[in-house]
Amino acid sequence: MQIFIKDDVTKETYKSIANFSNLEKVTDKPSANNYFVYDTNGLSFVKDSINPKEVLHVDFLKGTLGWRLKRVNHERNLRKALGKTDKQLSIFDSTAGLLTDTMIFLSLGHKVVAVEQSKIIYSLVKDAILRAKDKIPELKNLIFLNDNSLEVYKSMSKEFDVIYLDPMYPSLNKKNKKSGRLENIKKILEIENFTNCGENLVKDFFDLEYKKIILKRPLKLRKNYSNINYQVLGKTTRFDIYL
């Protein structure tokens, strides 16, 4: 895969990402169907060269997530799902994605090991972390890995207070404002052949020993597991908690 260097950026800013993902650096617009772009805003991914303006870009300092991080005390449902506690929790985020909820966990003072299977998504998020690390000190409590989360969890000797599971949602209505980003993620997972693995991953984690599992699901989605201890319900999302 190629990385299109669009602006006058220093080599150091993209070198580690390019090396990790084994990307070919180009300075002319690629003809491939999908590719990375690096400019002064950081790393982005173009999933369809026919629509090069439709990109996936991660930014923890502004936009929707930046706004959420500035008002983290308003994240009532996520806080309720974690439960009342005065101690710093150790959380294993098995489906890291764009790190949206993990950033909230970090802002609440907890430690997180987050694992993302997609090398493309991992590269985008890792670049966002590098850009934000000097302004978000809580990132020091994050271990972020590109791997199979089940195997990582099995290999770790420590016991986590929480396993967090947020498998991909079913396809959303096109009118939903969130669908664009989610569809981009789904397309990336298809490119990397990571399809139909979310529910299987959930089942595999339920077969393990755990203190607490938080499973994030669309509010009206059918419940696949009957031993829920309690739920936290939002307007469009619910958290199923298993103890």
Image (cartoon, grey):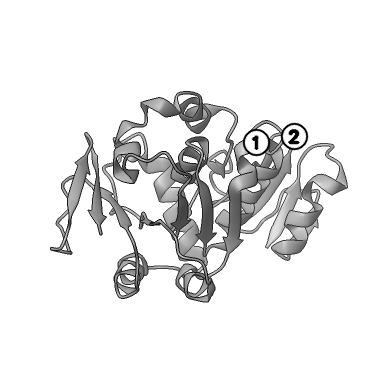
| Amino acid bearing label 2 | Thr
Q: Is residue 176 left or right of residue 183?
A: left
Earlier along the polypeptide chain: callout 2 or callout 1? 2
Q: Is residue 33 visible?
A: no
Q: Say left or right for 233 vs 157.
A: left
Of badges 2 and 1, nearer the viewer stands 1
Residue lying farthest front? 86
Q: Describe the element under mark 2 as helix, strand or loop.
A: loop
The residue that appears at 50% across and 58% down in the rendered structure is 188
Q: Which mark is residue 40?
A: 2
Which is nearer the eye, 165 or 42? 165
Q: Who is closer to the viewer here, 179 or 83?
A: 83
Q: Position of residue 118 (x, y in %)?
A: 54, 62
Q: Quadrant of the C terminus?
A: bottom left
Percent position (x, y) of residue 133?
69, 39
Which quadrant of the figure contains the N terminus?
A: bottom right
**x and y percent of residue 160 in the render?**
44, 60
Residue found at x 18% / y 50%: 230
What number is the disc on residue 175?
none
Q: Residue type at mark 1: give it.
A: Pro
Instruction: State the residue at coordinates (53%, 75%).
Output: 155
Where 111 falls versus 233 (above or below)?
A: below
Residue at 28% x, 54% y: name it.
Answer: 170
Can you give x and y, in whole percent of width and height, for residue 43 in the image? 67, 45
**Residue 114 visible (yes or no):** yes
SS label for mark 1:
helix
Does 217 sit left or right of 29 as displayed? left
| 3D distance between C-alphas at marks 2 and 1 | 22 Å
Mark 2 residue crowding within 10 angstroms, few (<14) / some (14–19) / many (20+): few
> Which residue has dot 1 on it?
137
Q: Nearer the viewer, residue 34 or 190?
A: 190
Crowding at dot 1, Cα within 10 Å, few <14 / some 14-19 / many 20+, comes out as: few
